[in-house]
Amino acid sequence: MKLDIDALQRRFDEHHVPGAAIGICDPTSVVWSAGFGTTRAGGGDPVTADTMFGVQSCSKMYTATAVLLAVHQGLVELDVPITRYLPEFRVNSSFEDHPERLITLRHLLSHTAGFTHEAPVGSNYLVGRESFEEHCESISETWLRFPVGHRYEYANLGIDLAGYILQRISGTPFHEFVRRELLAPLGLTQTTFDARAIKRDPGRATGHEAGKARLPVRVPMVAAGGLYTTVNEACRYIQLHLTAGASLIDPNLLNEMYAVPTEPQRAHGYGLGLALARAGAVPVRGHGGGGFGFLSDIYWAPQAELGVVVLTNSTNHHLQWQLASEILQDIVPTGSAEAEADGPWNRDYVILASGVRDGTARLRKEDGQLYFDHWRGGTLRLREHIPGVYVADNGEVLDLRRTPPTYANVRLQTSS
């Protein structure tokens, strides 16, 4: 399989992306991979398929896999209170007493514990020099946004706390536990959470963000966003999922990743450390990441047994998810059961405003374009922003990842 390299390079040039790497894989091989541009804006080395990029929130998927490996080994359990592993841990809540006694690893990995997104020590806004341990210990100073298990709300802190639990129960640094138990068995030698190893690689990509001369390499949010990898090795990580664990992990545990905890049979939403989404009509699994000069996508179509990785060293473009989605739709055979699968469109949604039924709307697909027939009259065109999130012509957002889904500031429930 081969993509049009010249067309891809023109696209990256148009969006002023210094460097990028793209890979396509099946269960046994990297079918095609290539690098584009250079490792830093205005210079550096040519990007290859073996250039390390920061993958930011794609890290969450690797952390969740490492947690499931620990479950497989009998070191932790998904559904016991995390105070079994962190007896000193506390967190503030106005909803319930001692919420830490209710929070489980499943809550942490599925963003349903109620945590806020940032910690007072080490955050996306003030990185600082504090360690991963100091960052995780400061989570006790935060307040939960809702009762434990009440709903999904994306948060770095749950994933970081899950990684910290691995560090505590193993007695080794988090990055070393992941290297030893997950990365080394898969032969991933250029994939790491270790900031020291990342800094030692002279050929790694440098993140670029307009208006910022320098961006940090080391971030305290290690488990939630600290991973660097290459496009070839990201493809090999996908192969772990395309081969049902590759004898490294119980396939039944991987299936735990692919189920939305609030609605296990739902085909879209957030499982354990990864998103269940659609590229057009194609059901996919994976994660995107962005920040500190990098945007990335690591997704696979399980039924078609094909995966796509897109890594870039710039945050100043709109190609995240868009390019990976286009490639996935292009490589999944036309007419396959997967390509023809029903999406969340062509369905009626009941509108709930302040808990009261306010009308019915329809999400439909016509000639490849998504439309939202508004319950108060009129039709809006939608474009997919990230998996499960659609932006209308008027700027309002339809978020199908939530339970129930939301449009702007109202909730939608599927009509019976």
Image (tube, grey):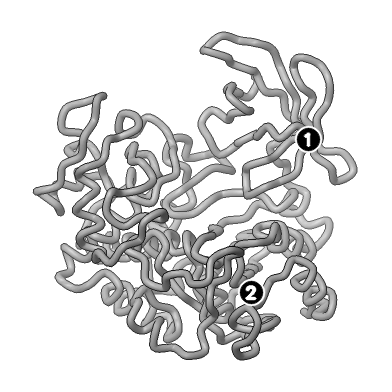
Please tell me which residue lies in front, 7 or 44.
44
Q: Tell me if residue 58 can be seen.
A: yes
Horizontal side of residue 173 vs 7, given as left or right = left
Q: Residues within 10 Å of mark 1 (few under 14, many from 20)?
A: few
Question: Label 1, on which residue?
Answer: 393
- Name the residue rendered at 20%, 45% in the picture: 140
Kindly report which numbered mark, 2 or 1, lies closer to the viewer in this rendering.
Answer: 1
> Picture coordinates of residue 100 (x, y %)?
19, 39
Tag 2 and tag 1, C-beta contact below 8 Å = no
Q: Residue furthest right?
A: 367
Question: Label 2, on which residue?
Answer: 26
Q: Residue furthest left?
A: 88
> Picture coordinates of residue 4 (x, y %)?
83, 77
Q: Amino acid at mark 2?
A: Asp
- Distance between mark 2 and mark 1 Cα atoms: 37 Å
Residue 40: mark in rendering: none
Q: Tell me if residue 295 can be seen.
A: no
